[in-house]
Image: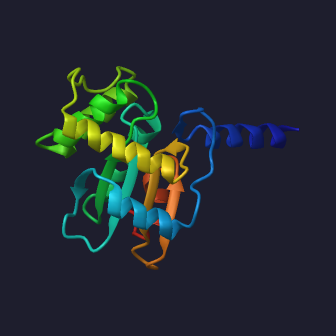
Amino acid sequence: MKIPALVLALAGALAVASCSQQDAAAPVAAGTPAQSYDAVIAQGKGFTVGTLMSANTVYVLFDPQCPHCGHLWEAARPLLGKTKFVWIPVSIINGNSAPQGAALLAAANPLDAMTAHEASILAGTGGTPASGSLTPEAEATIKKNTELFTRLKLESVPFIVTKSASSGQIVTHSGALDTPALASLLGLNPP
């Protein structure tokens, strides 16, 4: 009976492809993908990387302390020449999430700052050190992003919402993906 063991192993691997407050797999979102898309566009505030003049924008709600968000960052990097990403930090995991999110938002070069931060997270060293104090503006931004996350009834990060570049349909996804799967979700040709 090796097949059931394989199925259980795959199910376990899929269940941990995202981080949550409860550390369990969660529904993608309440409401429709269109409602999530509209809310994130109107209310989410993040930093932009990739092809700034792209007709398509990919929105990613992430927690700076989430290793699965780090894996998604690494998977997204080869696609930066094909689309624009807006990374929207939330604070759901621990006390380091908000200051690190604020530091990433304030970075002069968000691409380099996020790359260094996520490399540190994936290496298990906690991410880029952030100052202990948040400016009132940064604190308000992270708080509003986190409230948006909660209003959408999301329970895990990373959370992706975009329009497919090939079909124009709104798509959402909760959890990390590898580069080919992310390209497919976004309606892009793999790099």
Q: Nearer the viewer, residue 125 or 79?
A: 125
Which residue lies at the image location 24% right of the left edge and 62% below the top edge?
81
Q: Is residue 24 left or right of residue 148?
A: right
Residue 32 in percent (x, y) is at: 56, 67
Q: For the view shown, which residue lies furthest in the right direction?
A: 1
Which residue lies at the image location 52% right of the left edge and 66% below the top edge?
33
Question: Which image quadrant is residue 141 in?
Answer: top left
Q: Is residue 143 above or below residue 36?
A: above
Which residue lies at the image location 38% right of the left edge and 41% below the top edge?
90
Work out which quarter of the rendered image holds the N terminus and state it: top right
Which residue lies at the image location 27% right of the left edge and 50% below the top edge?
46
**Colour theme:** rainbow
Q: Is residue 103 visible?
A: yes
Residue 94 in percent (x, y) is at: 43, 25
Report the label total. Answer: 0
Residue 164 in percent (x, y) is at: 43, 72
Q: Is residue 165 left or right of residue 181?
A: left
Q: Is residue 64 above or below residue 41?
A: above
Work out which quarter of the rendered image holds the C terminus and state it: bottom left
Q: Nearer the viewer, residue 128 or 180?
A: 128
Q: For the view shown, which residue lies furthest in the left direction?
A: 108
Residue 60 in percent (x, y) is at: 39, 52
Q: Is residue 53 left or right of residue 35?
A: left
Q: Is residue 115 visible?
A: no
